Amino acid sequence: MRLVFIGPPGAGKGTQAERIIKRYALAHLSTGDMLRAARDAKTPIGVEADKYMSTGQLVPDSVVIGVIADRLAQPDCKGGYLLDGFPRTIAQAEALDKMLAEKTTPLDVVVELRVPDEELFKRLAGRGRADDTEDAIKQRLIGYSNQTKPLLDYYGKQSLLKTVDGLGTIDDIFARVTTILDTYK
Ligand code: AMP
């Protein structure tokens, strides 16, 4: 199964992603994790990415697309994967479609985890990560609305989009997700 998992920061995407990859034996491709690892290792890409990450802005498309293209070429992706935090812009989604069309391995499904903004702000402010200052949180929520929400329409038009209510317990949400994903196994 090739799956894109979309949701605003603070929606609980990471927690659900961990469970999903175990249940369906998927590779977990989180661009946030990859960029944080690159930043911590002080690679050229990491140093460049940190300029944006520290202020809650999106890293330029060309940088992220390069990172994901390398990752998709690795052998563990052959058994299916979950894309977590990528694509985040229409340009990234188009680049992904192109890469996958070349390999004749199109996406199977796009899952959106939907959570209202007030709830997101509450959750993010309580998380205490280094890039979770109030301004950076606001910036990330605005970025999600402006740059990532258009993807819902993009994937809706391809009939790939499934929306899941992201309110409730971790188990409730996971049950909603698996009800959908079990049909793609
Ligand atoms: P995340 O852990 O997915 O919230 O990502 C943390 C930060 O990494 C984001 O706030 C962005 O600065 C950057 N980032 C992660 N994925 C992407 C992406 N697909 N496009 C642009 N920037 C990204």
Image (cartoon, rainbow, N blue to C red):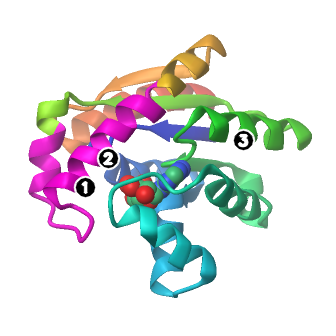
Q: Magenta span covers which residues?
A: 120-149
Say which mark, if any, is on residue 154.
none
Question: Residue 60, percent across and down?
Answer: 58, 54
Ligand 1 closer than 8 Å to label 3 CB: no
In the rendered structure, the answer to whether residue 105 lies left or right of residue 52 reads right
**Is residue 15 rendered to the left or right of residue 36?**
left
Q: Main secondary structure of the magenta part?
A: helix
Q: Is mark 1 within 8 Å of ligand 1?
A: yes
* Residue sitting nearer the eye, 164 or 11: 11
The x and y percentages for residue 157 are 62, 12
Residue positioned 65% across, 37% down in the render = 91
Of 101 and 40, nearer the camera is 40
Tell me which residue sits at (72%, 60%) in the image. Answer: 66
The residues tagged by marks 2 and 1 sit, at their Cα atoms, a distance apart of 6 Å
Check disc 2 and give the amino acid type: Arg
**Which disc, if any, is residue 136?**
1
The answer to which quarter of the image holds residue 102 is: top right
